[in-house]
Image (cartoon, rainbow, N blue to C red):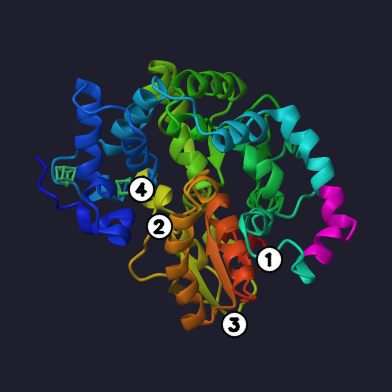
Amino acid sequence: MKCGLCLPYCPTYRQTGHEGDSPRGRIALMQGLATGLIPASPGTAAHLDGCLSCRACESVCPAHVPYGHLIDAGRALLRQHRKPPALQALLRDVLTRRWPRRILALPLWLYQRSGLQFLLRKGRLLGRGRLARLESLLPRIDLPLPLPLQAKDNHRTKVALFTGCVGELADRRTLGDTLRVLDRLGIAATVPHAQGCCGALHQHAGDVAGAQRLARQNQAAFQNADTILSCASGCGATLLEYPALTGNEGSAFSSRVQDVAAFLLANGAGALPLKPLKARVALHTPCTQKHAMKQARATRQLLEKIPDLEIVSLDSQDRCCGAAGSYLLTQPAMADALLAHKLDAARRLAPDYIVGGNVGCTLHLQAGLRRAGLNVPVLHPVSLLAQQLG
Ligand code: SF4
Ligand code: SF4
């Protein structure tokens, strides 16, 4: 239709005002690329690489244009003409593979626990450039990485927890707190060891074969699970896309995937004995939770179970924070420009906590707050719930 109704909702178009950075412009570029009318030039690639895959455009499109699938296909086309950017390829090769990730965790853990990180940060010895920004994104590493299996025969329900590659490395608190809350609800959780990365980094980089390989690995790892719980909406959104990757097997898998907040709400979270918390929480709703998982309300409803808690939106316009998978590393200028809106909101609202349901957003927000000298903890809604368990 090319109506342009999606343009005001596109975060990158709002930043640059350039048609090539809008959904309509990107679709036109991809159309040109597919028909051979437009070459796979660096300029074309820059506009397509600049898309956050946030799918805000898809949610408002009156013609239901499946933009998420289009941009993945467009990037797959680009991949036929160029090698993937080095940083993107490195992230995919290290982060998403179990043993390279676990080997990397040890020097990072030593770097943090030896005090070297504290000294470098305190003395601002890395300066203010790209290296310092990269270092500021480093999450707290906890060892050992594999989570303990937890399955109690007396529990009434059984679920399997999807940990994700970044989640396993950088969000062990959320995963551990989820196991605790599930246990209190009488729900047994297993953590299948054979699971892998969800495949988001591959899929959004146009590496269809890589995404399919990971989808099949997860389908095998979770074949006996009735419910597959995702604590990171970025992963959850990708798990829901498996039908497009592996057909019927993907459909059988994705029909069992649930967002952890929605699952807890439906399985007794309202009856948990929770201590009151007189605090202000600023809620960040990840794009993947809104536009892909369609669970935008679940986190707020879960937090409303905590007595006395004041819940405000971090950003009334609910813009993308700029994290978007590896985007925070590969497109730092746009990622930080979008993050600036969130940091302004944090200054204005002065919350005691910022809460969000996706590890990528959490890392991006934490790093930005730290760089801006704002001391606000950022955590997963389930961690706040677990903290208030009586
Ligand atoms: S993607 Fe949808 S909303 Fe955007 S220009 Fe095309 S038809 Fe209009
Ligand atoms: S996915 Fe997000 S960044 Fe990409 S075109 Fe749509 S609204 Fe813009």
User: Type of residue at label 4?
Assistant: Lys
Q: Is the CB–ligand 2 distance for label 2 below 8 Å?
A: yes
In the image shown, does 59 or 90 lie closer to the viewer?
A: 90
Of badges 2 and 4, the one in the foreground is 2
Number of on-image labels:
4
In the image shown, does 128 or 329 lie closer to the viewer?
A: 128
Residue 210 picture location, percent across and down: 52, 21
Name the quarter where the N terminus is drawn: top left
User: Type of residue at label 2?
Assistant: Cys
Task: Work out whether mark 1 precedes mark 3 in sequence or the reverse, and give the earlier one.
Answer: 3
Q: Is residue 379 above or below residue 226?
A: below
* Residue hosting label 3: 278
In the image shown, does 174 or 157 lie closer to the viewer?
A: 174
In the image shown, does 323 or 318 lie closer to the viewer?
A: 323
Name the quarter where the C terminus is drawn: bottom right
Q: For marks 1 and 3, give the CA distance.
A: 13 Å
Q: For marks 1 and 2, give the CA distance.
A: 27 Å
Boundaries of the magenta span: 109-120
Check whether the beta carbons of the residues at disc 1 and disc 2 lie within 8 A of each other: no
Q: Is residue 110 magenta?
A: yes
Q: For marks 4 and 1, give the CA distance.
A: 26 Å
Residue 181 picture location, percent across and down: 65, 54
* Residue hosting label 2: 320
Q: Is the CB–ligand 2 distance for label 3 below 8 Å?
A: no
Q: Residues within 10 Å of mark 2 (few under 14, many from 20)?
A: many
Task: Work out whether mark 2 precedes mark 3 in sequence or the reverse, and give the earlier one.
Answer: 3
Q: Is residue 273 above or below residue 147?
A: below
Residue 145 visible here: no
Check whether the beta carbons of the residues at disc 4 and disc 1 lie within 8 A of each other: no
